[in-house]
Image (tube, rainbow, N blue to C red):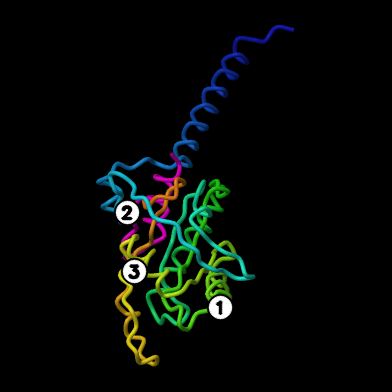
């Protein structure tokens, strides 16, 4: 049975509209790749050449260890904070949790992504408490803790200002001086750059997808 000329034309129009809609939806859902200046304007500073970091050993909940090897093969967002932080830490952690939700809603691939909270208050935070605090924002988050010397070693390499506490164990003013950046580590376990505050879900989502979709 031959297809009439009118039916054929309708079929061609339908195919054309379907292709246009597919391309339109694909453009909306595909992360836009930003250049370095666009990333910077939206809060992400990328190094021209990622920086190598030395090995480290932290502890997380359930007596798990977290080392440099756990960074390999994954894009890692690392934030330095502490469980008793009154303002900046919970706000930043909440924005990171909203980022995860947005990515999930978009079905963005997350198998090679991870989010780590490093305690800058090892005198009070335990491995279990900081991991529990991190997971309070998102079950995907990992909280880790190490001794002060190990912390300072990693914090220095990642340009996070974390000074030694005073001899007065009740004085925690040193915690107020930490840099409120979110560190970006690439799948080669190198320091790739950092997100600068103020953090918003829209800017984090835009820059994060632009970099990690490549």
Residue drawn at (43%, 78%), measured in percent from left and top? 121
Q: Which structural element holds mark 3?
A: loop
Query: In the rendering, at what x and y percent does residue 54 appear?
Result: 40, 56
Measure the alpha-carbon separation of dots 2 and 1: 30 Å
**On the picture, is 179 further left or further right than 202?**
left
Which part of the image, by quadrant, shows the C terminus? top left
Which type of secondary structure does the marked residue at label 2 adopt? Answer: strand
On the image, numbered disc 3 is attached to which residue?
Answer: 180
Determine whether, in the image, residue 35 is placed left or right of residue 149: left
The secondary element bearing badge 1 is classed as helix
Closer to the eye: label 1 or 3:
1
Q: Which callout, 1 or 3, points at the residue further toward the start of the chain?
A: 1
* Above or below, 80 relative to 172: above
Tell whether 125 sits left or right of 171: right
Q: Which mark is residue 44?
A: 2
Which residue is found at the position 44% from the left and 50% from the top?
189
Instruction: Estimate the x, y position of residue 213 in percent, counting from the top left.
Output: 45, 42
What is the span of residues highlighted in magenta in the rendered image?
Answer: 192-214
Give residue 199's mark.
none
Q: Quadrant of residue 141?
A: bottom right
The first of marks 2 and 1 along the sequence is 2
Which numbered disc, 2 or 1, marks the residue closer to the eye? 1
How far separated are the C-alphas under marks 3 and 2? 13 Å
Residue located farthest toward the right when viewing the structure as drawn: 1
The span from disc 1 to disc 3 (Cα, nearest Å) is 21 Å
User: Considering the image in quadrants, where does the N terminus appear?
Assistant: top right
> Does 7 lie within the magenta span?
no
Q: Choose top left, top right, bottom left or bottom right for residue 42.
A: bottom left
């Amino acid at each position: 049975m031959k297809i009439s000329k009118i039916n054929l034309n309708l079929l061609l129009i339908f195919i054309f509209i379907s292709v246009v809609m597919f391309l339109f939806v694909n453009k909306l859902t595909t992360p836009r790749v930003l250049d370095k200046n666009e990333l910077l304007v939206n809060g992400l500073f990328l190094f021209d050449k990622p920086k190598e970091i030395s090995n480290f050993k932290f502890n997380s909940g359930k007596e798990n260890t977290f080392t440099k090897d756990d960074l390999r093969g994954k894009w890692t967002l690392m934030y330095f904070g502490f469980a008793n932080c009154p303002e900046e830490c919970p706000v930043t952690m909440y924005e990171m949790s909203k980022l995860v939700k947005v990515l999930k809603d978009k079905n963005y691939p997350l198998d090679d992504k991870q989010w780590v909270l490093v305690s800058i208050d090892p005198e009070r935070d335990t491995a279990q408490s900081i991991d529990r605090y991190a997971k309070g924002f998102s079950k995907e988050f990992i909280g880790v803790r190490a001794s002060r010397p190990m912390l300072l070693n990693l914090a220095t390499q990642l340009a996070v200002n974390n000074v030694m506490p005073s001899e007065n164990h009740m004085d925690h003013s040193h915690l107020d001086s930490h840099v409120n950046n979110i560190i970006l580590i690439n799948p080669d376990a190198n320091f790739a750059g950092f997100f600068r505050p103020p953090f918003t879900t829209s800017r984090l989502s835009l820059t994060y997808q632009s970099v990690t979709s490549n």
